[in-house]
Structure formats: C-alpha cells, structure tokens
Image (cartoon, helix red, strand yellow):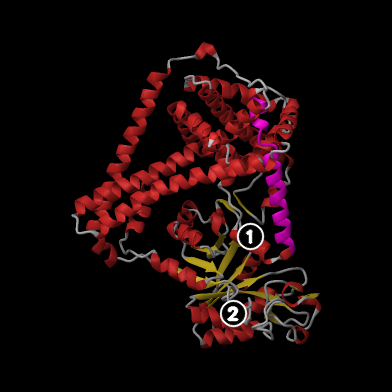
Amino acid sequence: MKTIRSVIRLLARNFWTLLGFEALLRLLTTLALVPVVQFFIDNLMAFYGYSFITLESLPIFLSHPGVIVAIMLLLLVLSAISIFDVSAVLLIFDQSREDKDITMREALSFGLKQAARTFYPRNILLPLYALLLVPLLNLGITSNIINSIPIPEFIMDYILENQAYTALYALVGLVLGYMFIRLIYTFPSFLLEGKSFVKSVKRSVSLTRKHFWGDLVSIVGLKLLFDGVLIVIVIIPSIIAMLVFLSSASTFIKSIVIGIVAATAVAIMLLTFILGSATSYAIVCARYWNRLTTLEEEIPNPEPPKWISRPTSPTNRWIIGIAAASYVVLCVSATSYAQYSITNKNEKIDTPAPQVEVTAHRGASKHYPENTMAAFRGAKLQGADWVELDVQQSKDGVLFIAHDSNFIRISGVNKNAWEMDYSEIAKLDASGLLNKQYKGERYPTLKQVLAWAKTNNMRLNVELKPNKHYFNLEAQTAQEIRDAGMTKNVIVTSQNYDCVKNIARVAPDMSRVYVMSLVYGKIDELDAANIYSVEENSCTERFVRYAHENGKQVLAWTINRPANMERVLENGVDNIITDDVPTAKRVIASNSSEITVDSLINDMYYYMLGM
C-alpha cells in the first residue's frame, strides 16, 4: 500500500505538467520524428540505388558499410531521445516527492542536459540498454517505436511448434526478465546521482540484491493493477451505453450516451499512450526512493535549472484548457458519428462491403496434418475459398506437396527431397510425428491435388520453393496446371522474386503472387507480380491502399488470432491466409454492417483517431 500511495502522489502532484510535457513530446515525435526517420531511410535507399526493400533484398542493403554506420547513428539518436524523455519525467517525479511545483521548461532543460550524456564515451553502453532493456518497462519514445513492431505471428507459431525453440525462447525471456529487474534502478542512479552508466549498473545490481522477487512482484503487479483499473473505467460506461442502446430511448439520447462513452474510451486510450511509460517509471521511482530510505542513504535531489524557472499556474491553466477542449471536441464528434450511424443503419445494411476471402494455409492445418489430402478436404468442409499448398520436387522430377524440403520435422527422416525418388517419398508418413489420429497420410503429388481441386471446385494458392537442386520448377508446375484445366483457378506464388519472374515468362496467362515478409518503398516496380501476399504486420492501411491504387490485391498471411484478423480487415485486405478457417470466417462475418454497441464504439474509436 505504501508503494501505491507513493506512485499516486508522484503522478498527481505535478499531473498537468507531466501530462503537458508527455503529450507535447508524443505529438512532436509523431509529427516530426517518424517523417524524419522515413526521410532518412528513403534518402539512404536512394543513395545506394534502392527504390524498394523486401526481406529478400534487406541483407544486401544492410551489408553496405554506410548503411550500417547510418543505422547506428539513428539508433544513437533514438536512444538520446528516450533518455531525454525519461530524464524529464524523473525530474518531475523528484519535485513531486519534494512537494514542489515544476514547469515544463525546467523538465525540458534537465532532459536535454541528461540526453547529451548519451554521447559521452564513458556511457557507450547506455544506448544498448535504452534500446533493448528499456522497452520491457515501456519507457520512453524509443520503446514506443520498438514495441510497435510485434513479433510476426508465423514466427511465434514456428517457435511454439518446436520444443527446442520454445525452450530457448523461454530461456531468453527468463534471462531478459532477470536482467530487467537487476538493472531496474540504472536510470535513477544515472540521472539523479550523476554516475556513469557502468557505475549506475553496479549501483542497480547492489540495490536489487536480496530484493529481486519483491521488486518483480511490486513493479509487474502494480503495473497490472493500474492497467486493470483503466479497463474497469472503460467497461462500466460501456455497459451503461449498451443498456441505453437496447432501451426504447430516442436516437438523440442513444447518440449522446454512446458518443460520450466512445469519447471517454478514446481519451483513456490517449492517456494510456501518453502516460503509460510515466506510470511504469513512477513505480520504479517509488521503489528506488523507498529502498534508499530503508538503507538510510541520502536521497539525491537534483535542482531544476533556475534560470528558466517560471510560475507553473499559467502553464497549467493552458494545459487544462486544451485537455478540456479536446475532450469536448471528442464528445461532439463521437455523438454526431453515433447519430449518423444509427439513423443510416438501414442504408448500411443495403450496401454490404466486399466480402474478404479465406485461404486455408497448408490446408486446414490447425485441425489436420498440414499439406495432406486430409487437410485439403478439411478446408473444403470448413468453407475455405482457397487452399494454400507448397510444392517440392523429388529426385526423379515428381512435383509433390510439402512445406519443407527436408522430411525431419514431419516424418522424422533426415533426408532432402532431391535425394529421394517419389516412390520412396510416397512411403513416408506425412501426418506428423505427434499426430496419431491421421497416421498413414502421405505426401500427395501436385497432379493429385489439382485433380481433387477441379472435382471439388476449389481454388489453389500454389507456392513454389525453388533451390539449386530443382530443375524447370516453374515450367513444370505451369504445365501440370494447364494439363489439369485449372489455369483460371490457381495462383502461383513464391518468396523468390526471380521465381515470380520465371513464372511470368513461362506462364504469362497465370496469376502470379510475390510473397513478402517485409515491404517498404515503391513495390509497384515489382511488375512481374499480379498480387501481393504480405506478412500481416506489413499489411498497414497505407500499404493496402497503395497496392489497390496500383491495381494489386493484397493477401495477408498467416493470421490465426482474431484481433489480428480484425486489424487487417480494417486495413482493407482482400484475403486472409490462416490455419484456422472457422475463426477467420466468423471474424469476417462479425465485421458486417449490423449496428451494435461494440461496432459503433470501435468504428468511432478508429474514426476519431484518424481525425
């Protein structure tokens, strides 16, 4: 309870100064930092002759010495901005602890002075700490940038499917968690006590000795507690809005209530974004000062620069006024949007949005062994519009279906496709080492799958995985598709752009898809592809709009979580590639034009954030 009271006091004493500083910094970095970074990358690409970058071209781009130096300088600047942010917040908390007022100018000046220390030779490891460990506590601008790049779902799925990788992932998480707690007081020591980075690290290790579990429970537990309080604050008004929506109240009353709820939800989201890192660090500061008090050590108390000191009340009145006006604008906008949506609900239902299609990744691979006839038949039963499959080539030139060229993961045989005739491959069990229910499933040939697809009116997404051991892969695939009479019902895809160009050369009448994990730049120059298949984190609204403007459809892969499905649907993708067809179909159906409280609040949330 003592820590909770301390945290609330640190946040409340100079709340408006804290809110004003953090809001201004977030605004400036959103308006200036992101475009500057983008300008920096664009010019760096132009200097080395790149108009676009995909994962395929990224290693070559990063191999240029100038690129490496430029990226290191950029990371150093990002680290300095993060130090600036944390320094100013920490000084505000220090003045709150002393029950003193502080102005935004004082916090800004102190932050700039501390940020300059990032470039001191003796603090050479500080940027590494700020960029790698600080995001674990969600501190500063740098962490907001890093945390906005989630681990792709397909990578996490791959890790969790492999016991060795899962164990390694868990071990890395434990190590980082341990380091995170042991180094948690590095910044207070560095910024308040004025020590070098190395001495600050030693100081943090000393302060956390014998207190690891207490610090862990307090810091993580209190953060979860504060987050939980925010969720409750949002849920209660939402329940009230739902009751009003279902009542016989007039459209005007419903619009006002739902508008205020949506505006409040957006305001809380914005506050969480603006003050989320500050809340985390308030918890750390409270623990740090309590620890020093327990040890009967003198608490460092850096004074803000007096030469720029100004009375706080005029500044705070401006901040309060801007915050109040912003909330009123949110309420009016949300109410107007709600009234329009409810009044025009019949018109919305009469004009449904284009239906997004679903592709079963490696067949219905969540419920059946991947890339087998069982998985393909299961996809048909589950209502998939397309089936995605992977093509390999045997030693004797037979095209068959398997994701890996090596059979160790699925069949437990450490041999490659090009080392075995198909007669040998056909004897292998393709059901997976841990799957007993479908034991005896085989690796089907491409011809078998094409014949089944034609009979069952199923469209296919055929991915080619060329390597130096395969011969005429593109031409042979195209010929088998033609022989099956499936030219119009098959798209041929690859993560290798040379392969896509080869398909365009040997089969110009077939749809060609370039599969990308990373997308940046003018990818319309990739004109050998008719369609883009893009990892879901790169399926931003901006990219999808850009692709559509250039006449390209966008397939989003591989998405199994409903929240991620909803996000790419909001961004306008044409097709969701998933292991879980039923969930994808359900999410797409729920994103219909039917008016509900949830849909209204979600629509207004995205509408107002885009204002």
Q: Residue sitting at 46 percent across and 53 percent down?
A: 541
| Residue interval drawn in magenta | 164-191
Q: How many marks?
A: 2
Kindly indicate the quadrant of the structure image that contains residue 389. bottom right
The percent position of residue 357, horizontal first and vertical second, equals 46, 70
Tell me the residue that label 1 is attached to: 156
Question: What residue is rendered at 57% in x and 41% in y?
Answer: 138
- Image check: 251 left or right of 275? left
Residue 158 in picture, x, y percent from top left: 66, 64
Residue 444: % across, % down? 66, 83
Closest to the camera, between mark 1 and mark 2, is 1
Residue plotted at (29% across, 44% down): 333
Q: CA distance from mark 1 to mark 2?
A: 22 Å
- Determine whether 333 is above or below 320 in the image: below
Q: Position of residue 483 (x, y in %)?
A: 59, 85
Q: Identify the residue position indicated by label 2 in the image.
A: 375
Res. 606 visible in picture: no
Q: Is residue 476 left or right of residue 606?
A: right
How many residues crowd mark 1 within 10 Å: few (<14), some (14–19), many (20+)?
few
Amino acid found under the numbered disc labelled 2: Ala
Marking on residue 63: none
Amino acid at circle 1:
Met
The single residue placed furthest to the top in the displayed view is: 307
Question: Considering depth in this image, is 358 or 597 the residue closer to the camera?
Answer: 597
Kind of element beneath mark 1:
helix
Note whether 454 is above or below 151 in the view shown. below
**In the image: residue 531, left or right of residue 405:** left
Q: State yes or no: discs 1 and 2 in contact (Cβ < 8 Å).
A: no
Determine the secondary structure under disc 2: helix
Location of the C terminus by quadrant is: top left
Specify whether residue 98 is in view. Answer: yes
Secondary structure, magenta segment, majority class: helix
